[in-house]
Image: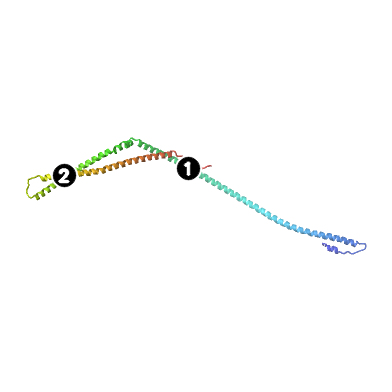
Amino acid sequence: MVLTPNEILNKEFNSKFRGYDSDQVNDYLDIIVADFEKMIAENNELKKELAASKEKNEYFAQLQDSLNSSIVVAQEAADRLKQNARKEAELILFEAEREADRMINSASDTAKNIVTESDALRRSSKSYRTKLEQMIRQQLEVVTSEEYHRLFDEEIESQFNPDHFHEATNQRVNQRVDRLEEENSADFNAAHEITNDRFVEEEIRNAPEPTPEVDYPATFGVADHEDTEATRVDLNRDELLNNVEPEEQEVDSRHAELEAMIDEEAQAEAEREKRAAQRRESVLGQTIRIELPKD
């Protein structure tokens, strides 16, 4: 049973002979009550502090548990991150190695294609150079041949000599004049006979009386025939002479056209030689550049 200060203070003892002094006992009890009250108050304070300490201890215990669980979760998360990072690194490394292999294979194929194309270009350029040299040699052989010099130095001068054209034109004109004169003289003789017969019949029919025989119709017909023939010959000569001028003009124009054609051919030949020389220089001086992939 726990005593309280009031119980101690109100406690009464029986008095006996030769007992303790009641005043001293009461004073002592008062001291005990005061100390006891003080101890009770301290005990209560200690209880309160103990309860608070327990609460704090529980809080810190919970906090410790949460911290421990957090640490565990963090550790697990760190482990997962490590695993994911390791897997991702392995995947990146695998992709990088595969991409590197692909780039190496592509670069190797490109290098092989470049080498093949360069060989093909070298062969084609060599073939083109050979053909170009052959063509140039053939052109030089043609240009330096005797037939070429004779064609452009002798035959053209003799063929397009204006004196020869005039002589040939005069010969053709004279031949045409002679042929026309022969044809016209035959036509004139036939017309003369028909005209004389008709004229004699009309004179005989219209004559009033006989007259001395005079060879008038024959004389008249001959004179008329000669005058007519001379007139027609003169007209034919004038026509032929008039036709000669256009023929001479046509010959001159043809001569000019031929000279222009010769000049154009010479210019075209010079232009072809110039282009051939340029192509030869461009082909012979061409540099083939091959860029191989760097390591």
Badge 1 or badge 2: first in the primary sequence: 1
Looking at this view, is 262 or 55 the one in front?
Answer: 262
Which of the image's four quarters has the N terminus? bottom right
Nearer mark to the viewer, of 1 and 2 = 2
At horizontal 34% and vertical 40% (from top left) the residue drawn is 263
Q: Is residue 158 left or right of residue 234?
A: right
**Quarter occupied by residue 169:** top left
The spot of residue 89 in percent (x, y) is 59, 48
Q: Is residue 256 left or right of residue 51?
A: left
Q: Work out how far the residue at label 1 is from the one at label 2, CA to CA, in angstroms.
A: 98 Å
**What amino acid is found at the position of numbered circle 2 in the picture?**
Asp
At horizontal 85% and vertical 63% (from top left) the residue drawn is 9
Q: Is residue 192 left or right of residue 10?
A: left
The spot of residue 257 in percent (x, y) is 31, 42
**What amino acid is found at the position of numbered circle 1 in the picture?**
Ile
Q: In this view, does 150 lie to the left or right of 92?
A: left
Label 1 crowd (10 A; few <14 / some 14-19 / many >=20): some
Q: Do the residues labelled 1 and 2 touch (CB within 8 Å)?
A: no
**Quarter occupied by residue 153:** top left
At horizontal 48% and vertical 42% (from top left) the residue drawn is 114
Q: Check disc 1 and report its element: helix, strand or loop.
A: helix
**Quarter occupied by residue 250:** top left
The spot of residue 224 in percent (x, y) is 14, 45
Q: Mark 1 points at which residue?
A: 114
Q: Mark 2 points at which residue?
A: 227
The spot of residue 128 in percent (x, y) is 41, 40
